[in-house]
Image (cartoon, rainbow, N blue to C red):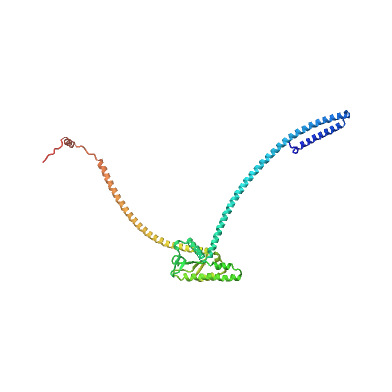
Amino acid sequence: MNLAANPLTLIGASAVLAIALTLLVSWLILRSTRGKDAMMQEHMQRLAEQQAQLQGALGQIVTGTQSGHGELKRALNERLENMSKRLGDSLEQNREKTGESLKTLAERLALIDRAQKNIEVLSQEVTGLQALLSNKQARGAFGEIQMQDLVKTYLPPSAYDFQETLSNHTRVDCLIRLPAPNDDIAVDSKFPLENWRTMNEAPDDAAKKVAAKLFTNAVIKHVRDIAEKYLPAENISKPAIMFLPSEAIYIDLHTHFPDVIEKSFRAGVAIVAPTTFMATLHTMRAVMKDAQMREQAHVIQREVEVLLDDISRLDERVRKLDTHFGQSKRDIDQILISTGKIRSRSEKIGDLQLEDDPKEDAVTEALIATPPRITKN
């Protein structure tokens, strides 16, 4: 048993040691004073009795200490079990919460991974778009394809042609055919990106002014080229359309260079961006639908006139048929009168009673009895 873990046991051991030391001292004194009298012996006897009493008390203390130690041990075990149970429950709850947190974290990481992939794809597309826009020919093809997609989306296939050759032997990017009496509309795609980018990236006002002059000259040149190439052709209406595949360039023109817009209108060319081009195509489609409705209205009017003629002929034929039915009814009435007379006469004949003639009966019986002979001539 560990004495240091139980204070009562330590006290008892200390008392036993003290008693042993007392007895040792008494024995030494007795040895040195053997010649004393009986009083000393009596004193030693009392000391022995006290020692026995102390030993009994010490035994009781040790027994009580062992009993208290057992109860303490049981209490400690119960507390340890309760603590272990609470600790286990807490660990289980923490494990579940940790699992849920890890699951949520995995989902968020998956979302972040997909977003990262989308960003990478977008970055590649942006890089490809930059490479595309850096090439002048590819940039022109990009604007032309965007214009074609808008036309295909908002107009019926019969209303347009791409890369159509006009009467003056020039080829236009798109020719929109409006219903008569309107003429066709020429659409050409232009993309002055380099001059516009140079103007926006100018380091100071002077450089920006020079770049702005180059940009406006480039736009006016495109307008002039469209007017000179397409408007002189036959059946081409004003204004022709110059398609800019950039909203930013279009906004800059209307905001900072309104004189360029005025010059383009005077030249017979309308500059449009994707949004304004969509609105223009909507208007053209409305004109086409209106023309179709007017054409269909004429067709419906002609068909109604033909239908009225058919109704008139049908009415005449029904009247004739009604006349025939009236004559037939009169004929049937006459037939019914005749059949009534015949029926009444038949009834009168049926009511007559014929008398029997005895001579005729005798002749009839004779003929039956002796049939006539057939002779040969």
| Identity of the residue drawn at 57% across and 55% down | 116
Most foreground residue, 200 or 256: 200
Find residue 315 and report its image quarter.
bottom left
In front of the other: 251 or 17:
17
Q: Is residue 157 visible?
A: yes
Q: Position of residue 166 (x, y in %)?
A: 44, 68
Residue sitting nearer the eye, 289 or 309: 289
Q: Position of residue 73 (x, y in %)?
A: 71, 37
Q: Nearer the viewer, residue 338 or 60?
A: 60
Whether residue 205 sits left or right of residue 76 in the image: it is: left
Q: Quadrant of the C terminus?
A: top left
> Quick one: which residue is furthest to the top in this view?
38
228 vs 94, left or right, is left
State which quarter of the image contains the N terminus.
top right
Q: Is residue 79 above or below residue 267?
A: above
Residue 19 at x, y percent in the picture = 81, 33
Rendering coords of residue 68 (x, y %): 74, 35
Number of marks drawn? 0
Name the residue at 78% across, 35% down: 13
Q: Is residue 253 visible?
A: no
Left or right relative to 347: residue 284:
right
Please, is residue 263 above or below residue 365 in the view?
below
